[in-house]
Image (cartoon, rainbow, N blue to C red):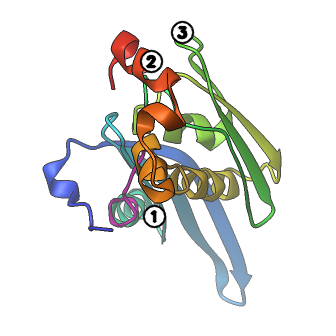
Amino acid sequence: MAKIDPDKLALEERVVRTNKCQKTTKGGRNMSWSALVVVGDGNGYVGTGLGKARAIPDAIRKGVEAAKKNLIQVPIVGGTIPHELFVTEGASEVMLKPASPGTGIVAGSSMRTILELAGVHDVLGKSLGSSNSTNIAWATMSALKQLKRVEDVARLRGTTVEELAPWMKKLEAGHGS
């Protein structure tokens, strides 16, 4: 898979969560911050990153740099995802289902931010297991990486898109991609 160049995309940045970490030592308290950042162009490209630093602005900047390195392309069909997914990543479990047009993004936490910045308009999402927003973000990104296009599945199976999914032609004619 080819590396995606973040400089060629008009990326929007959103901070999902900041977390303060405090360590007490003999000389006093040492504070540091971590920031979970999501970047996306709203047109199929999204990435997440975690930045850690002594100050919030530095942590956010590092998070944005990390997110740009982790960009992936999400296949979107008619404003939704192509198929249902259930992914376990660490202690988090994430379920994503395609939804009919007009449903919107029915998901919470960091999952909603990732799907919005990816450009998905209609999807049903459920977070199970860990409620930690960082773990949910990693599980959601893992799920989006596993999405497959109908054309790719048809090619792997040695058949045509029309034979594999006859409903796709109607969907693409009604909504576009």
Q: Secondary structure at mark 3?
A: loop
Viewer-closest of 141 and 80: 80
Q: Secondary structure at mark 2?
A: helix
Q: Which residue is mark 2?
A: 171
Instruction: Answer with left or right where residue 111 lies relative to residue 126.
Output: left
Please give the name of the residue rendered at 40% of the width and 64% of the height, measured from the top-left corner: 70
Instruction: Answer with left or right where residue 40 lies relative to residue 81.
Output: left
**Which corner quadrant holds the N terminus?**
bottom left
* Residue 116 appears in the rendering: no
Viewer-closest of 135 and 146: 146
Q: Nearer the viewer, mark 3 or mark 1?
A: 3
Q: Which residue is mark 1?
A: 55
Placement of 126 over or under 49, stated as above or below: above
**Which corner quadrant holds the C terminus?**
top left
Instruction: Answer with left or right where residue 13 lies relative to residue 18.
Output: left
Q: Nearer the viewer, mark 2 or mark 3?
A: 2
Placement of 89 over or under 79, stated as above or below: below
The three-letter amino acid code for the residue at tag 2 is Leu
CB under 8 Å between discs 2 and 3: no
Disc 3 versus disc 1: distance between alpha carbons?
41 Å
Q: Position of residue 57 (x, y in %)?
A: 39, 57
The three-letter amino acid code for the residue at tag 3 is Gly
Q: Identify the magenta region.
A: 67-74
Q: Position of residue 32 (x, y in %)?
A: 56, 70
What label sits on residue 102 in the rendered view? 3
